[in-house]
Amino acid sequence: MVKIKPSLSVKLGPLTLKNPVVTASGTFGYGEEYSKYFDLSLLGGITTKGLSLKPMQGNPPPRLCETPSGMLNAIGLQNVGVDDFIKRKLPFLAGFDTKVIANIFGNTVEEYEAVTARLDRAKGVHAIEVNISCPNVKKGGMAFGTDLEATYDVIRAVRNATSLPVIAKLSPNVTDIVPFADRAAHAGADALSLINTLLGMAIDIKNRKPRIANITGGLSGPAIRPVAVRIVWQVYRAVGLPIIGMGGIMNAEDAIEFMLAGATAVAAGTASFVNPLAPVEIIAGIERYMIENGIDHAHHLIGQVQA
Amino acid sequence: MIARIRKNEELLEGYFIVDIEAEGIGLRKAGRPAVPGQFYMLKAGPSTDPLLRRPLSLHRKLSDDSVRFLYRRAGRGTALLSRLIPGDEIDVLGPLGNGFPMPAGIKHALIVGGGIGIAPLMALADYISDERKDISAAAFIGGRSREYVLGADEFSRKGIETFTATEDGSLGKKGFITHILDEYIHEHKHKGTGGWAIYSCGPHPMLISVAAMAKKYGIKNYTSMESNMACGIGACMGCVIGVLDREHGSSVYKKVCDDGPVFDADDIVW
């Protein structure tokens, strides 16, 4: 058999990625930090830190702590705001040959709509990822993502405010995620990001205080991977939208597991904190796996778990 | 980068020095040396538990290819590190962060450290005594008891006038090192403190007290801060502290990893 270079390109609905690996929102800043470590053009896509209508200060420290094979964070969506992003951060990202996925959130449906409208007009944004699943802010975020009608309303509003592909990032902090995925699909989402962090808590038994100031935070890292794989598989079987799978992906083996469960693309998140080169190592590892297993196209991995 | 352990020794119960080697580990971009006050993110072993790297500040630059850290075994990450032996590999990112500023006009550096806080200050003392003959220095080192006053002998050997204090009086004056610092400044201030700067690192209450004293005497105070970090390179926003934004008269969150770890103490929202 002649070994040819496999095609890593995947299609997330209308959005084509040169390879299935993107960065998870909130773990890659606006790209600048990691550009010192590798060529961002190697990535399938870059998902930005969440953007709001106005800049946000975020939560008081301490904001994070380590937990078994994971970490809890309550950053609180600190960000520069959509206007500053477009003016100061986007031109830098636009210089790379990769897809820029702008992650957005708001306190109201109208804010989601307004942020989307601004990004829709900006040059260099390729898709909107709608965060309705942040566990660390009082309003907005998860409050939308754990209510079926609010999920529909937000995604619908964003859908109507842009012609860019719309990706709904859903919360795992619900009993059954499938109806939420279904509502997002009906509202016009082109793809789903699964999953955001799991709500968690850790206590310092010496001083009897919560380890992070927000008391509760979002759990990420390898500790949540089986939960994320299960959710991707459930949604893949039940809902027809392409999925960006994420949750504790540290290497190519983990990424392939998500694709077999039904993910079209995968996101490296916490992995980038530990190893800035994780996303590019995952791309190389997926390609190696495809060559070794005679898989000529990344699409042929999606949902191929023999269950 | 992958570095190798050359030496990893327990100085006293729970306190270690580790020397690691890798090509260019003591250098920043463009071949310039790492700056005192900068730090590295270390990971001992590929396990996901513990998951994150541990930040350690540069204790001594031994050569362009070798650096030393002083660390306390505080949790599982540093416990793993403490078990590495010469020849073992360790995954290292760095040098990172800004380092201690040394603006033009500084003539006299007051180095104030408590306990393990001496770690980055030794690199500063090395720099001043090796490369800045134009700057004089005095050191103020505190600890719980005699054995926890780290590095005082080394400071003296460099010809830096060194004062010590312990909580139990087993070495130097009994009490807090900040009292000695206060006496020292009080005694010398008639000769003028223009061109003086205080460099501090140590327990939070000590830093607060030093910052207040610096303000009282009108002396610049640069302090190296600590925080839980995930990435160490400015991406996660997890390690922030409150810092005064003088332009807008409000406080903002700044990242200890890449806005710091050294801050003007007068800007910190203690």
Image: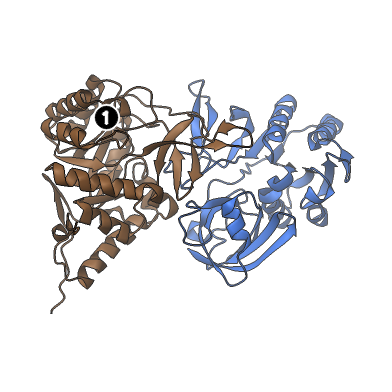
Please determine whether, in this image, residue A228 is positioned above or below residue A293. above
Instruction: Tell me what residue is drawn at x 84 percent, y 44 percent.
Output: B163
Determine if residue A267 is in view: yes
Looking at the picture, how far across and down is residue B128, in whole percent?
A: 71, 51
Image-based side of A211 in relation to A293, left or right:
right
User: Which chain is rendered brown in the image?
Assistant: A
Looking at the picture, how far across and down is residue A14, in whole percent?
A: 10, 44
Residue B140 lies in what quarter of the image? top right
User: Which chain is rendered blue in the image?
Assistant: B
Instruction: Tell me what residue is drawn at x 48 percent, y 51 percent.
Output: B52
Image-based side of B175 in relation to A242, left or right:
right
Looking at the picture, how far across and down is residue B107, in whole percent?
A: 73, 42
Viewer-closest of A175 and A98: A175
Query: Which image quadrant: the C terminus of chain B?
Result: top right
Viewer-closest of B75 and A166: B75
Circle 1: residue type: Gly
- Disc 1 is placed on an element classified as helix
Instruction: Tell me what residue is drawn at x 22 percent, y 51 percent.
Output: A265
* Coloring scheme used: by chain
Residue occupied by mark 1: A145
Please determine whether, in this image, residue A265 is positioned above or below residue A195. below
Count of all numbered marks drawn on residues in the image: 1
Looking at the picture, how far across and down is residue B101, in whole percent?
A: 61, 43
